[in-house]
Image (tube, rainbow, N blue to C red):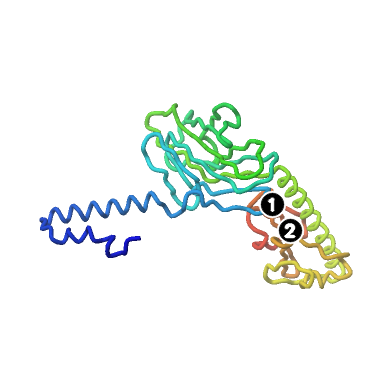
């Protein structure tokens, strides 16, 4: 291996070359542009470094974690921000590689949106979705860019054991004059249908548990005249104030079906309360119960708010 001094030795000769001020300025500008291009092409995120899950039942990756990208029209694969991975107006193919999964039926899902520009009527992309190099539908899938953003494509697929590659190839051969629309891939996921059914059962259990807590709290307030106070949102545990207060009103402590990862939460000012749980199937939502009933809202259970 060359020493650092030997590696840079060829550049020592430049010191003996006399060049004009303009020439040196041009060389400096060229070097700066080249360095920017190298940085831009390498990106903040390493292609193929997508996160993995250990349960072998599901996998997902932000769009920016593509394994490779092929561009027909000569432009670059562009990472925009934390929401969008890669986008282009037309003629792109991006490929993702999953972690090792169990063989079985999965739901392939990817979220996409228009990154920037107008959405005229009739503007749509033709998207080929490939699993391990084969079109999963055997035809081109048309995705209309109208409606709310982001948009979602879902399809059931048969996945072999081990790693899989998912490719999305899009183009717009119906381009309308004056339209400035970019197709952006936000995320790609393979979700085991067994895992989804399991998540659905967990959510049913959460709703049942919260109903049980509400019934116990109704009996408690009938006897005591006020709900157990908890001025800040706090996880419900076997030794929490709520459970200790409900001794005699609650047959047994009820914990989230996934206790290592999730908790129920409780908050009360004495006259109002809320008890909340995070939902699995509807990510980013919680179910919360209060004196007058239960509802689903956006936000985590840790953001539980007092209900009448």
Q: Nearer the viewer, residue 239 or 26?
A: 26
156 relative to 118 in the view: left or right: right
**Residue at 71% over, 64% down:** 265
Residue 25 spot, x, y in % from top left: 17, 55
Q: Residue 280 carries which label?
A: 1
Residue positioned most to the front: 1
Residue 178 spot, x, y in % from top left: 37, 32
Mark 1–mark 2 Cα distance, whole angstroms, equals 10 Å
Q: How crowded is mark 2: few (under 14 residues within 10 Å), some or many (20 or more)?
A: few
**Residue at 36% over, 37% down:** 74
7 relative to 80 in the view: left or right: left
Residue 182 spot, x, y in % from top left: 44, 39
Q: Residues within 10 Å of mark 1 (few under 14, many from 20)?
A: some
If the image is split into quadrants, where does the C terminus sit?
bottom right
199 relative to 169 in the view: left or right: right
Task: Please report contact status of discs 1 and 2: CB closer than 8 Å, yes or no.
Answer: yes
**Residue at mark 2:** 258
Q: Quadrant of residue 32?
A: bottom left
Q: Could you say whether the residue bearing mark 1 is in a helix, strand or loop? A: loop
């Amino acid at each position: 291996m060359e020493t650092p001094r030997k590696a840079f030795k060829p550049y020592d000769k430049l010191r003996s070359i006399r060049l004009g001020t303009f020439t040196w300025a041009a060389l400096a500008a060229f070097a700066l542009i080249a360095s920017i291009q190298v940085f831009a092409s390498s990106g903040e995120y390493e292609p193929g470094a997508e996160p993995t899950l250990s349960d072998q039942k599901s996998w997902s990756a932000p769009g920016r974690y593509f394994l490779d990208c092929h561009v027909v029209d000569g432009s670059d694969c562009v990472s925009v921000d934390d929401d969008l991975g890669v986008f282009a107006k037309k003629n792109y193919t991006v490929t993702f590689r999953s972690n090792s999964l169990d063989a079985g039926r999965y739901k392939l899902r990817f979220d996409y949106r228009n990154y920037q520009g107008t959405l005229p009527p009739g503007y749509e992309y033709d998207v080929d979705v490939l699993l391990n190099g084969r079109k999963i539908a055997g035809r081109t899938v048309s995705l209309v860019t109208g409606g709310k953003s982001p948009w979602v494509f879902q399809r059931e697929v048969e996945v072999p054991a081990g790693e899989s590659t998912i490719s999305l190839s899009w183009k717009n051969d119906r381009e309308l004059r004056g339209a400035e629309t970019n197709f952006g891939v936000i995320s790609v996921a393979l979700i085991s249908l067994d895992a989804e059914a399991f998540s659905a059962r967990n959510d049913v259990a959460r709703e049942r548990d919260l109903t049980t807590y509400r019934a116990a709290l109704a009996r408690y307030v009938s006897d005591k005249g006020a709900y157990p106070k908890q001025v800040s949102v706090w996880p419900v545990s076997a030794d929490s104030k709520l459970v200790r207060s409900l001794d005699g009103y609650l047959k047994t402590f009820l914990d989230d079906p996934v206790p290592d990862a999730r908790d129920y939460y409780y908050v009360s000012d004495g006259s109002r309360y809320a008890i909340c749980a995070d939902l699995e199937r509807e990510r980013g939502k919680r179910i919360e119960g209060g004196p007058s009933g239960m509802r689903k809202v956006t936000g985590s259970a840790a953001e539980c708010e007092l209900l009448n």
